[in-house]
Image (cartoon, rainbow, N blue to C red):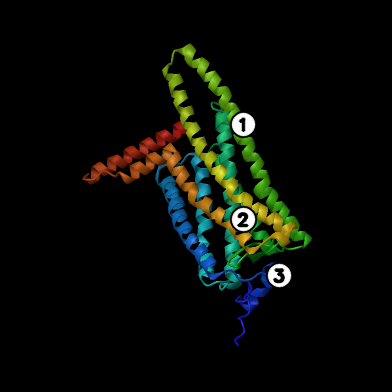
């Protein structure tokens, strides 16, 4: 009588030198069905293709088109850069998923965790900065001194990425460490450790990287709703008194465009909340009630984060009139033009871009 094969546990196929990085919590679980890793690998392939194309195209348009180089769109570019960077690390996950384990060892884990931490913080804070920018535009429609200008935007983006880099380096300095999680095909900071210093770092990251941005975003959008309601009443009275003059019509048209832009940003914020709140919940459960955390549960939030990186550029491309106009202009390049005529069209496009940018700012 043949004996039944012994069960396979998570970590059985991990390189021996990689075992010290794996939490004992994961090693007690049975290895997942190979089809689970294959499915995740295929999903990540599609995520990577859509995200790299979408975010890459957004960055290409911002760099190529002067009309898109406003302060607000520079923040959009920061978000697109973070999402693009986030998906550059996915080959590590895809390879390990198809090979059913952490075959790339410590180097792959450290690379995956560090890039994920850097891009995650940058994406979160970029969305927060976009919300702040939208609030300042609505709250101060005529006071340019209280809105983001080129210098303030540059400082803000620099702070976003330098702070993200600082938090990314911290685990290498002993405040935490990058370790595998779940099926051991992805890596993040060690939220299962009972060490007080590592738990304090987790609390700090959760506060600065999720709770505080969430509060600021909610404050900004509640403020936008209040300002919009008041301005609607004032604009209605002004229109009735003025008899629908050109100045009022232009102002109303600009307000209408700003509302459409804010709906786009609000959609991104909602997607961000749906994407990062599950991850914050998993980290909280892992830190306080790890006995309830399973490998499958830890893999779901990462999927949500990657999905947001795919959706963000298409929201901007579809909902933002400026981006949509440039996309149409890009894909409807006139054929049959002479080189001199094409140069004239390019010059005209650049002139319109500089004009639109000066109006928007």
Per the image, the residue denoted by label 2 is 165
Q: Is residue 228 left or right of residue 324?
A: right
Q: Nearer the viewer, mark 3 or mark 2?
A: 3
Q: Residues within 10 Å of mark 1 (few under 14, many from 20)?
A: some
Q: Residues within 10 Å of mark 2 (few under 14, many from 20)?
A: some
Residue with the most extreme front position: 1
Residue 11 image point, x, y percent: 63, 73
Nearest the camera: 262 or 303? Answer: 303
SS under mark 2 = helix
Residue 182 image point, x, y percent: 62, 64
Pick whichever of labels 1 and 3 is earlier in the sequence: 3
Pick whichever of labels 2 and 1 is earlier in the sequence: 2
Residue 301 image point, x, y percent: 60, 55
Per the image, the residue denoted by label 3 is 24
Per the image, the residue denoted by label 1 is 223
Which label sits on residue 23?
none
SS under mark 3 = helix
Residue at position x 34%, y 39% from top? 349
Nearest the camera: 174 or 23? Answer: 23
Q: Quadrant of residue 198?
A: bottom right
Kindly check if marks 3 and 2 are in contact, taking CB atoms under 8 A apart as contact: no
Give the Cα separation between the discs numbered 2 and 1.
Answer: 31 Å
């Amino acid at each position: 009588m043949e004996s039944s094969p012994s069960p396979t546990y998570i970590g059985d196929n991990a390189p021996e030198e990689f075992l010290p990085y794996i939490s004992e919590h994961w090693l007690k679980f049975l290895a997942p069905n190979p089809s689970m890793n294959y499915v995740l690998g295929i999903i990540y392939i599609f995520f990577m293709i859509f995200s790299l194309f979408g975010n890459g195209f957004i960055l290409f348009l911002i760099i190529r088109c002067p009309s898109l180089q406003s302060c607000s769109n520079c923040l959009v570019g920061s978000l697109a850069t973070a999402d693009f960077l986030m998906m550059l690390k996915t080959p590590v996950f895809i390879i390990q998923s198809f090979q059913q384990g952490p075959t790339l060892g410590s180097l792959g884990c450290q690379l995956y965790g560090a890039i994920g931490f850097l891009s995650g913080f940058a994406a979160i804070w970029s969305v927060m900065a976009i919300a702040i920018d939208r609030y300042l535009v609505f709250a101060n429609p005529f006071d340019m001194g209280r809105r983001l200008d080129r210098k303030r935007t540059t400082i803000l983006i620099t702070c976003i990425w330098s702070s993200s880099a600082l938090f990314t380096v911290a685990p290498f300095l002993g405040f935490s460490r990058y370790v595998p999680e779940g099926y051991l095909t992805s890596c993040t900071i060690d939220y299962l450790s009972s060490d007080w210093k590592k738990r304090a770092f987790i609390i700090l990251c959760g506060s600065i990287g999720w709770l505080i941005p969430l509060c600021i975003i909610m404050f900004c959008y509640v403020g936008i709703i209040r300002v919009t309601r008041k301005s609607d009443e004032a604009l209605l009275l002004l229109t009735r008194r003025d008899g629908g003059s050109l100045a009022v019509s232009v102002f109303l048209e600009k307000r209408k465009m700003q509302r459409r832009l804010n709906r786009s940003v609000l959609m991104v914020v909602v997607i961000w909340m749906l994407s990062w709140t599950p991850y914050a919940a998993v980290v909280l459960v892992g830190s306080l009630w790890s006995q309830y955390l399973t490998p499958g549960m830890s893999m779901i939030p990462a999927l949500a984060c990657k999905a947001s990186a795919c959706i963000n550029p298409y929201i901007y491309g579809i909902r933002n009139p400026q981006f949509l106009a440039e996309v149409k202009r890009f894909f409807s390049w006139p054929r049959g033009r002479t080189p001199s005529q094409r140069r004239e069209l390019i010059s005209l496009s650049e002139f319109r871009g500089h004009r639109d940018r000066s109006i928007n700012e």
